[in-house]
Image: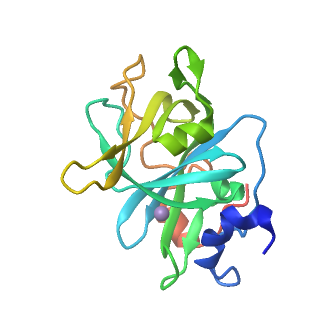
Amino acid sequence: MPRKNGKLAPYRKKRQFAQTPEPRGSIKKSKFPIFVIQEHHASHLHFDFRIEVDGVLKSWAIPKGISTNPKEKHLAVPTEDHPMEYAHFEGVIPKGHYGGGTVMVWDIGTYENIKEVNGKLMPMDQCVKRGRIEIALTGKKLKGGYALIRTTRKETGEYYWLFLKMNDRYAGKPIKSMTKSALSGRTIKQIAESGEEYEG
Ligand code: MN
């Protein structure tokens, strides 16, 4: 296995690309780092939050979805790194396959790392490693600061991540077009019915 694809090995291992419309994808860097949030109607509805770090999309599944209220801290479960091409994936993963169900690009855009330590930006790979991510989003729906914080459960010593809105001028603002794709304008029902990948 070529070493440069190592980070995508877990992603590829879970999928049969002849049978799912999901991209095999690649590791590559954007000019400005991107984020994407996908609404995923799998066996359990969740939102996948992904941010570009070192050429892949670092990913978390958020069962409770997105809130602009800084007091609502939502559990975020880390999942495997996804290829960059996944940011534009919208369509239907066949039943019986990994993540089977309909995927909608709920929001997409760029982000800026705003995590500072002693007045200096902490590099993104360090933010992920240390579980201290603070980023400003410029999406079609979401704007401003969001944080992903890793904490340890006192009783068990287990790690868990929380996703939350940071307190800024966008905090508490209602989200526009909650139910429509930020990529194609379609609803989840329209995507499910067309059953096709968005070719935009
Ligand atoms: Mn998912």
Percent x, y of residue 123: 63, 32
Name the residue nearer the viewer: 30 or 101: 30
Q: Among all residues in the image, which is located at the extreme left?
A: 155
Q: Give 180 or 117, whichever is nearer the viewer.
A: 117
The residue drawn where x is 29% and y is 39% is: 73
Q: Residue furthest top?
A: 119
Q: Is residue 128 above or below residue 101?
A: above
Is 16 situated left or right of 192 in this image? right
Residue 71, located in which quarter of the rendered image?
Answer: top left
Say above or below: 13 vs 65. Answer: below
**Along the horizontal axis of the image, is 26 left or right of 59?**
right
- Res. 4 image quadrant: bottom right
Q: Foreground residue, 159 or 92?
A: 159
Q: How many marks?
A: 0
Q: Quadrant of residue 32?
A: top right
Could you tell me if residue 21 is visible in this image?
Answer: no
Locate the C terminus and report the quarter of the image it occupies. bottom right
Q: Residue at x 71, y 66 (%)?
A: 6
- Identify the residue shown where x is 62% and y is 78%: 13
Coloration of the structure image: rainbow
Image coordinates of residue 190 in percent, x first then y, are 52, 63
Q: Is residue 180 visible?
A: yes
